[in-house]
């Protein structure tokens, strides 16, 4: 290797074979010509670069050095570097995009099995994290019962208003319309067999046992899980949760317990409201379409509908409330320090909460069918 000059940079042959010594400045102003000089050196003839003579190095020069290091198969090393140069080289190395391999059009069975295993493991870890947050909530709730002064009753009332009272109009309207649809569709089918009166049983069992609490929980999951994630995630982005810990405050006691407990209290009430609104809508449609008077509707409802259906529907509400609250709080705590993460976790919380509610409802249905209720 011979000595040459590139603007204010000098390439000097080192004392040992394969060593190159740089002297001067390697910046954006001479990086193009420096790359040309580097390219003229065969990769096999270069094993180390002495950077002790570099007086100035910017990100463009660091990029050129990293490109030179990565071009050959030999393990090229930088020697006699300062802490500033090492820090700059590390920063540029981390910022460089990682090469992406072209995906195989037809992945092998082993690759598919590996991907499936990773997804199953990620799902198990996610369920474990949710169970951990449920445990945190139950522990803080038990502590609040032992030390009532730590419980924030004002926060509980506020969240009861947010998740319960403000959700009454949309829940009642939804159930009312569902009752109308069930009555209309049921009457159309049952009229063919002269069994129009059984539309009352259809409405009562469908709403009281399944649709009333399920659709209410889905609406609440869309409203509340996203609200919990957005609120807690925004606090995490602004480092307010770290500030709470610094002040000796427990974020779980302040943020989780009032929200989840408010859902636990208000969701059964919303379920009752949905049941009443659905029965009212179904009864109104049965009166208009089939001529079943309100008195006849009530008589058939009382005589033909067991109270077990009401029990089956309402016993699901506390479980659905825990699912929605835990999912929303967990997603909020996973938000990173950027708005993109907040939006992604909010969407994930809604999808996860709705999916979990539907799965839990299916499990409840199988369980109650097995025990004959």
Image (cartoon, rainbow, N blue to C red):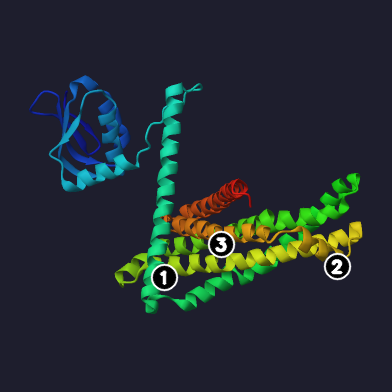
* Nearer the observer, 7 or 288: 288
Q: Is residue 239 visible?
A: no
Circle nearer the N terminus (3, 2)? 3
Nearest the eye: 65 or 144: 144
Please report the residue visible at 30 percent of the width from the left and 39 percent of the height from the top: 93
* 263 sits left or right of 70 in the view: right
For disc 3, the marked residue is 224
According to the image, label 2 marks what residue?
295
* Residue 175, placed above or below residue 367: below
Residue assigned mark 1: 254
Residue 122 is situated, as x and y percent measured from the top left of the image, at 42, 41
Is residue 302 visible to the viewer in this orientation of the structure?
Answer: yes
> Dot 3 lies on which element?
helix
Residue 284 placed where, x, y %? 84, 63
Quadrant including the N terminus: top left
Residue found at x 70% / y 63%: 275
For label 2, count other residues whose C-alpha is less than 10 Å away and answer few (under 14), some (14-19) or many (20+): few
Which secondary structure lies at badge 1?
A: helix
Please name whichever residue, 160 or 369, is drawn nearer the observer in this view of the structure: 369
CA gap between label 3 and label 2 equals 38 Å
Q: What separation in Å lies between label 1 and label 2 (alpha carbons)?
A: 49 Å
**Image quadrant assignment for residue 248:** bottom left
Q: Is residue 63 above or below residue 148?
A: above
Q: Residues within 10 Å of mark 3 (few under 14, many from 20)?
A: many
Q: How dense is the environment of label 1, judged by Cα within 10 Å: few (below 14), some, or many (20 and up)?
A: some
- Image position of 54 (left or right of 291): left
At mark 2, the secondary structure is helix
Given residues 361 and 302, the one toward you in this image is 302
Circle 3/circle 1 CB separation < 8 Å: no
């Amino acid at each position: 290797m011979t000595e040459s000059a590139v603007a204010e940079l000098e390439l000097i042959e080192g004392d040992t074979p394969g060593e190159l010594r740089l002297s001067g400045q390697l910046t954006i102003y001479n990086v193009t010509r420096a790359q040309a000089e580097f390219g003229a050196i065969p990769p096999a003839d270069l094993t180390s670069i002495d950077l002790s003579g570099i007086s100035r190095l910017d990100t463009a020069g660091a990029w050129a050095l990293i490109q030179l290091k990565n071009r050959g198969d030999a393990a090229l090393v930088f020697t006699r570097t300062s802490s500033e140069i090492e820090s700059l080289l590390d920063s540029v190395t981390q910022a460089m995009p990682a090469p992406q391999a072209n995906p195989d059009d037809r992945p092998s069975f082993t690759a598919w099995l590996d991907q499936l295993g990773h997804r199953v493991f990620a799902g198990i870890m996610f369920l474990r994290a949710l169970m951990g947050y449920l445990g945190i909530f139950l522990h803080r709730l038990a502590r609040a019962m032992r030390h009532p002064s730590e419980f924030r009753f004002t926060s509980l009332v506020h969240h009861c208003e947010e998740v319960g009272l403000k959700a009454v109009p949309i829940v009642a309207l939804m159930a009312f319309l569902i009752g109308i649809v069930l009555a209309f569709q049921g009457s159309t089918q049952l009229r063919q067999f002269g069994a129009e009166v059984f539309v009352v049983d259809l409405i009562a069992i469908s709403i009281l046992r399944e649709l009333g609490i399920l659709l209410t929980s889905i609406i609440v999951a869309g409203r509340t899980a996203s609200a919990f994630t957005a609120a807690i995630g925004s606090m995490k982005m602004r480092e307010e949760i770290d500030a709470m810990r610094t002040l000796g405050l427990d974020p779980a006691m302040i943020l989780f317990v009032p929200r989840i407990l408010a859902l636990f209290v208000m969701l059964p009430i919303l379920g009752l409201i949905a049941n009443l609104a659905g029965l009212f809508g179904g009864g109104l449609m049965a009166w208009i379409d089939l001529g079943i008077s309100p008195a006849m509707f009530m008589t058939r409802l009382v005589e033909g509908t067991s109270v077990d259906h009401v029990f089956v529907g309402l016993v699901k509400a506390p479980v659905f409330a825990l699912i929605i609250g835990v999912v929303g709080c967990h997603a909020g705590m996973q938000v990173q320090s950027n708005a993109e993460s907040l939006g992604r976790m909010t969407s994930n919380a809604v999808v996860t909460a709705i999916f979990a509610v539907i799965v839990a409802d299916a499990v409840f249905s199988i369980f109650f069918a097995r025990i004959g209720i």
